[in-house]
Amino acid sequence: MKLIEISREYRESARLLRERLRLLRQMLAKADDPEEIWHIKRRIAELTPMLTQMNELADLTEHYYERGYWRSEKYTL
């Protein structure tokens, strides 16, 4: 598999995460039960960093071989 193909997979995963987060926020707006609200907020808090990482990795794998592309220190040795 080529890095550009991996990048597409990351982008698709990020799209799915964005959709799930959107649904969770809609559920949160309609929720009345404090326990349900807590669980929804917790799930949103867990998924948000995953979305950030998916976007960062999609960019990294898409531009990995481009000269001059700045790579985050987070993903380098």
Image (cartoon, rainbow, N blue to C red):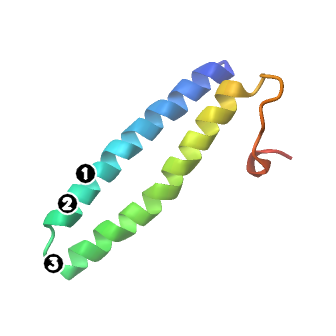
Residue closer to the observer: 25 or 9: 25
Examine the rendered structure and indicate whether residue 15 appears above or below residue 75.
Answer: above
**In the displayed structure, does residue 53 sit left or right of residue 36?**
right
Q: Pick out the residue farthest to the bottom.
A: 34
The part of the image, by quadrant, that contains residue 39 is bottom left
Q: Between marks 1 and 2, how big is the CA–CA gap?
A: 6 Å
Examine the rendered structure and indicate whether residue 25 appears above or below residue 69.
Answer: below
Q: Secondary structure at mark 1?
A: helix
Q: Between marks 2 and 3, how big is the CA–CA gap?
A: 11 Å
Which label's residue is closer to the chain start, 2 or 3? 2
Residue closer to the observer: 12 or 63: 63
Q: Pick out the residue farthest to the right.
A: 77
Q: Label 2: which residue?
A: 27
Q: Pick out the residue farthest to the front.
A: 68
Q: Amino acid at mark 1?
A: Leu
**Residue 60 pos. (x, y %):** 68, 34
**Residue 3 pos. (x, y %):** 67, 23
Q: Between marks 3 and 1, how big is the CA–CA gap?
A: 17 Å
Query: Residue 23: which disc?
Result: 1
Query: Residue 33: which disc?
Result: 3
Examine the rendered structure and indicate whether residue 38 appears above or below residue 43.
Answer: below
| CA neighbours of label 3 inside 10 A, class few (<14), some (14 to 19), many (20+) | few
**Where, quadrant-wise, is the N terminus in this rendering?**
top right
Q: Amino acid at mark 2?
A: Met
